[in-house]
Amino acid sequence: MRSTTIHLALATGLCVLVGCSQGDGQTLVTGQPVTLASADAAPFWPCFQGPRGDNIADETGLLQAWPEDGPPLVWTAEGIGQGYSSVSLARGLIFTAGNINDQSVVTALDLEGTIRWQTPVGGAWTGSHPGTRSTPTIDDDRLYFQNPLGELFCLNAATGAPIWNVNVLEKFGSSNITWALAESVLIDGDHVISTPGGPQTAVVALNKMTGETVWQSPSAEGDPPGYATTTLVEYAGKRLIFAFTGKAVICVDAGNGNLYWRFPHETSYDVNALKPIFRDGRVFVSSGYGSGSRMLKVQVDGDQVSVEEVWTTKDLDNHHGGVLLRDGFLYGAKYRRDWACLEWDSGKTMYTQRGVGKGSLTCADGMLYTFGEQLDMGLVAADGSRFEVVSQFKLPSEGEGPSWAYPVVCGGRLYLRHDNRLFCYDVRAQ
């Protein structure tokens, strides 16, 4: 195992981009470009919840059980800053973000855990649960990241050099929310999608090359933004964006921002954090604090798009650790502690079990990787008929705060982030 930090020496032959203060208070990003590996040859998880947005990795040949103390730890990287951002991977680099001093900072590491560059991207969230929330989105040679204060940045993915930035809250007349913005922005063709909410709009599309506004939807009855990432689908001849505001599920046209419908979904403190899940004309959402889950049916009739409720349940009230759909079953953690499985079609509860406690998850090679908020990592078969923690270990982190960052499995490795550290495990079957 090897540990790397922000204070890497240039004598290693690697270039680290660091923020340098000038007398006028400006921050510079310095360093030389890093050559990005071919996209075809590198592990590919370019955005929050992966290339399809379903949080399921296309990995095979992985361990179906771990040694007692967990899979082999390959490396630990330090110096990524304080936060809850997960990781994205593309073109031979790993990207994440965190608070460093009084700034939000995006970090790029190579596949050996060495920091290659770091770029400040606006101010830091220092309120309740300080740190970054969203995950960088990689699109070709550019990186997009929205910090908790609404600063949406476009960076050169190879060097970290800033290209443009827009504060979506200020530009579209909205306000921040109790625990700050957590949305990981979506790339749709030439557009980057964000959900500032507020009295003037709900969802906006910016030109991904320039940051200029392409369209903005009408306001969803003044709803504040939620904490969720949007979902883009093509269905019945329509391209639709589903978003979770602080008070409702909404549907807008991906081409022009037309707001088709708003379906109320109220929860305590306006914490709607789940990325909506879509399949075969249905949309699933869930929220914590006992609010529960809701399945909606989308209907398209010419230029009209409508919605009706199919089922609801209180048996799964996912706070912010995510829910995923596999083979007709929904898996996720409840607000209090248990893990639950629901049948997609009916909402029937298949089980609720303790497992590693409330947390986040991903899926690879038929297994659920469940990451508890108290640093416990558990491996569970993705089986709607039963729940069994096959293997479990404790992340050896000395950081502070809960472990809320989503786990990622990519290129035969498991990435777990806690506070200022990123841990990389080898989960390939030998």
Image (cartoon, rainbow, N blue to C red):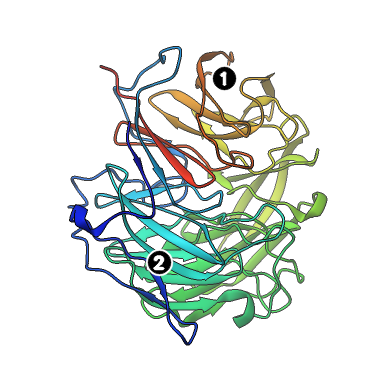
Image quarter for residue 182?
bottom right
Horizontal side of residue 190 vs 283, given as left or right: left
Q: Residue at x 28, y 62 (%)?
A: 140
Q: Which mark is residue 384?
A: 1
Q: Secondary structure at mark 2?
A: strand
Image quarter for residue 167?
bottom right
Place of residue 9 in the rendered image (x, y in percent of width and height, measured from the top left): 27, 56
- Classify 10 Å Cα crowding around label 1: few (below 14), some (14-19), many (20 and above): some
* Residue ID for mark 2: 119
Horizontal side of residue 155 vs 53, given as left or right: left
- Does label 1 or label 2 sit earlier along the sequence? 2
Tally of marks: 2
Q: Residue at x 54, y 67 (%)?
A: 194
Place of residue 68 in the rendered image (x, y in percent of width and height, measured from the top left): 45, 12
Question: Closer to the camera: disc 1 or disc 2?
Answer: 2
In front of the other: 118 or 371 = 118
Q: Residue at x 37, y 69 (%)?
A: 155
Residue type highlighted by circle 1: Gly
Residue type highlighted by circle 2: Thr
Q: CA distance from mark 1 to mark 2?
A: 43 Å
Which quadrant of the figure contains the C terminus?
top left
Query: Could you tell me if residue 25 is visible in this image?
Result: yes
Place of residue 341 in the rendered image (x, y in percent of width and height, measured from the top left): 63, 25
Q: Residue at x 59, y 69 (%)?
A: 203
Above or below for 121 versus 389: below
In front of the other: 217 or 404 = 404
Above or below for 200 versus 85: below
